[in-house]
Amino acid sequence: MEQEEFLQIYFAEAEELTQSLEKSLMALEDSPQDENIVNEAFRAAHTMKSSAAMVGFHQISEFTHTLENVLERLRNKNLVVTRGLISLLLEANDFLKQMIENASQGKGEGEPKKFEEMKGKLGRFLGLEAPVGVEEKIGTVVSPPQKDRYYKIVMNFKRNLFDTGQDPLMLLLELEELGEIMKIEADLSQLPVFESLNPYELYISWKLIIKTKEVLSKIEDVFIFVKEDNTIQIEDVTHRFGKGIDAEAAHKLLGEILLEEGLVLESDLDKALQNQKKLGEILVEQEKITPKELEKALDIQEESRIHFRRSTIRVDTEKLDKLMNLVEEITTGISRLNVGLGLEPQPLSIHLQETIENLDKIGRELQEQVMRVRLFPIEGTFNRFQRMIRDLAYKQGKKVKVIISGGDTELDKDLIEHVGDSLKHLVLNCVDHGIESPDERRRKGKTEEGLIELRAFQKGGKIFIEIRDDGRGINKKALIEKAVNQGLLKEGVTPTKDEVYQLMFEPGMSTTKAVTDTSGRGVGLDVVKTKIDQLNGSITVSSEKDKGTIFTIAIPLTLAIMDGMKVEVAEEVFIIPTRYILGCFQAKEGVIKTIEARGETVNFRGEYLPLVRLNRALGIDTHGFSKDGIVVVVDGERKRMGLLVDDVLGEQQVVIKSLDKHFRRVPGIAGATILGDGSVSLVLDIYGLEKLLFKN
């Protein structure tokens, strides 16, 4: 593996580890007595230290080592978790992120002055300086010097150890930091002949004796990330070294002596040991189990091992995009084949139809798998917001508890990136405007600690994200007054609750008098709505005074491929996404009725729905209404409606392409697609069309 590949693996892993460390620190603040959380944080720091040293980033390794030592004191209960300590550890993690980013951009690792400053802050918690405001555990006693202990360590690694980012030499160096390696043996018996040697595989195993003052758990921590997949044996053999001399030499097994003297190979011993019977064979001979029961148990064991060995790999998104483009080409190609099928003679047509159906099945399976690979849980985004909420609340003297649900809801990677900024603004808005100070909450009879809930769930072809707080709610009166002053609302007009909330998304509509780092400048929510609209999504608001506010964002599961219905309007073909369609029926005479103050309607399953003549809505010239037209009933964001079209041409899986930047925000149009005959068709945005037609 080239150095560049090692670095790519390191930076990807380091990003995950800093996120994991931040998540653990946030959880530790809420559950300071949870030892599992402390251990998770320690493991993340430990791995970062080792991997940074392995790729040559010694400054990052040194800083992480200091951070690891502070976490070690927490593990040993020599420090108590306080809000101030967590703030410092989060600050240290932020600095670590910056160092890693600098290294990835070739800018060095860290600014020396800041490096020493941050290291000094952490050092205060290690007794290197008198800690300022540190809450030490009461009654902590300085331990007397420990006696020497001796440990025997056997390290047998899998061949693919290097692929996991681990290096046995780094483990040996870590052991050397803990004490003195008295004896070490390298087993080279598995080395192949030179012609067969693979430099990326590990063939060597080690045995050693280490003299140290550390306890067993400290030695075990060195192997914390390799012990599950490899064979690591650690044995306390202090009793053998009464005067620093190994007393075991007099009690060694014959096989060990023969091996050390080089008189036999390990393979010779293995062959000899194979004559010993296995547990299963012994139990069968004793008639405790039957051969069939033994075979079944062995199958279960092997299946469990196979499942355990499953792993994941990182894939460059550029490679996924190329694969996705190929899937899109297959989809378009199948559509063209279907069109050409009607031009072929009947016998050939049947043969082609079978081939196309099979190809279509393969294409859909391929598309589904690629789409799944591109899906990521939204939990990572929610976790980042948890940190932002914590820091802003701390700065403003507020207490906020964050609840996350539905974090395993998966969303296309591009959508997560596009919606992230909008979610961030709404979350900060909840802390800044929604949650009250502890004093204000007490006066209202609330708990001092405010609540913000981040929730995600999937419904149909959409992902819904809710951001809820239990704060003061939206001041509707102030919002209306501001709208009147801005000329967005006529004085004396009484808007509905929904209309009032939609005013929040107009430019310059902030009602906050104080300007802070996060709000009060009159910008923000209008940008949020614009971004959501660009994703063919929607945002709604509900609020109650002193009970809180809920922002609900709905966005498509994916923007790439979907099933659609081809409809014809004045000889033009449009695509209506299938997920919005509730039904279709002939627009025969008498079906369409005009109701006073409501206009044209159609009866669908006992409910009168507004009728939209699609040619008029899209501004298409036509020579009149066809009595034999078809009504396509669709489910909009807030209401159902019937779309009158000339004809329905059938279903087709389509690949949505973005329009030129000048046409991207045309109301009612989601994008374009290439049909099977090579022509271009516009894809309708049902929610956008609804907003355009019923905004008043």
Image (cartoon, rainbow, N blue to C red):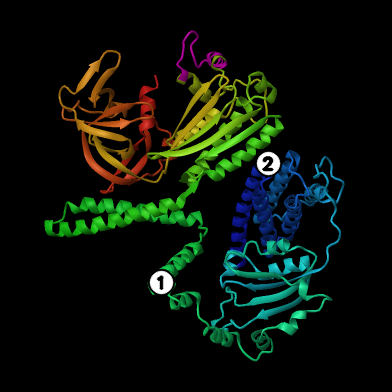
487 relative to 518, above or below: above
Callout 1: SS? helix
Q: Which residue is mark 1?
A: 295
349 relative to 189, above or below: above
Number of the front mark, 2 or 1:
1
Stretch of the chain drawn in magenta: 478-497
259 relative to 291, above or below: below
- In this orientation, does residue 687 appear? yes
Check contact, mark 2 vs mark 1: CB within 8 A: no
Callout 2, which amino acid? Glu
Callout 2: SS? helix
- In this orientation, does residue 1 appear? no
Going from the N terminus, do you reach mark 2 or mark 1 first? 2
Callout 1, which amino acid? Glu
Q: Which residue is mark 2?
A: 29
Q: Position of residue 226 (x, y in %)?
A: 62, 65
Camera-side residue: 307 or 380? 307
Residue 185 painted magenta = no
Instruction: Judge from the rendering whether residue 557 lies leftward or rightward of residue 509; answer left or right.
Output: left
Specify few, some or many for label 2: CA neighbours under 10 Å numbering under 14, 14-19, or 20 or more.
some
Q: Position of residue 212 (x, y in %)?
A: 79, 67
Q: Residue at x 64, y 24 (%)?
A: 436
Q: Given the current orientation, which residue lies at the most extreme top position?
A: 492
